[in-house]
Image: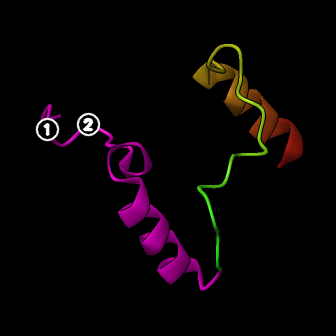
C-alpha cells in the first residue's frame, strides 16, 4: 500500500470549522461542536481469528 494512500487525516483536528460545516452538510443535522463517539474503544485489537469465530457462532 502506498504510504500516502494509507494515511488517515483527522480533518476535525486540522481544520475544525471546515470539518464541522462538512459534517452538518453531509448529515443534514446542526452540530454546534464535533460530536464525541459513544462507542468504547477496545483496549487491544481483536485478532482476526476471534472475529471469524464470532461470525461462525452467529451465522
As helix, strand or loop, the secondary structure at mark 1 comes to loop
* Depicted 8 relative to depicted 24: above or below: above
* Residue 21 position by quadrant: bottom left
Instruction: Give the residue displayed 33% in from the left and 40% down from the top.
Output: 8
Instruction: Give the residue displayed 60% in from the left and 86% down from the top.
Output: 28
Query: Position of 30 compared to 20: left or right?
Result: right
- Say which mark, if any, is on residue 7: 2
Instruction: Estimate the x, y position of residue 57 in percent, counting from the top left.
Output: 87, 37
Between residue 6 and residue 14, name the one nearer to us.
14
Instruction: Give the residue displayed 32% in from the left and 45% down from the top.
Output: 14
What crowding class fits label 1: few (fewer than 14 Cα within 10 Å), some (14-19), or many (20 or more)? few
* Depicted 26 relative to depicted 2: above or below: below
- Say which mark, if any, is on residue 4: 1
Report the span colored magenta.
1-29
Evaluate if marks 1 and 2 touch, with contact meaning CB atoms under 8 Å apart: yes
Instruction: Estimate the x, y position of residue 51 in percent, counting from the top left.
Output: 69, 30
Q: Name the colouring of the figure.
A: rainbow
- Say which mark, if any, is on residue 14: none
Instruction: Give the residue displayed 50% in from the left and 70% down from the top.
Output: 23
Residue furthest right in the image: 58
* Residue 2 position by quadrant: top left
Q: CA distance from mark 1 to mark 2?
A: 5 Å
Instruction: Estimate the x, y position of residue 19 in percent, counting from the top left.
Output: 41, 62
* Depicted 6 relative to depicted 35: above or below: above
* Residue 22 position by quadrant: bottom left
* Depicted 42 relative to depicted 58: above or below: above
Residue furthest top in the image: 44
Instruction: Estimate the x, y position of residue 1 in percent, counting from the top left.
Output: 17, 34
Residue furthest bottom in the image: 28
What crowding class fits label 2: few (fewer than 14 Cα within 10 Å), some (14-19), or many (20 or more)? few
Residue 22 in the magenta stretch? The answer is yes
Amino acid at each position: 500500500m502506498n504510504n500516502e494512500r494509507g494515511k488517515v487525516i483527522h480533518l476535525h483536528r486540522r481544520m475544525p470549522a471546515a470539518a464541522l460545516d462538512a459534517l452538518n452538510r453531509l448529515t443534514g443535522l446542526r452540530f454546534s461542536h464535533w460530536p464525541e463517539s459513544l462507542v468504547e474503544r477496545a483496549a487491544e485489537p481483536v485478532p482476526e481469528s476471534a472475529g471469524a469465530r464470532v461470525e461462525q457462532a452467529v451465522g
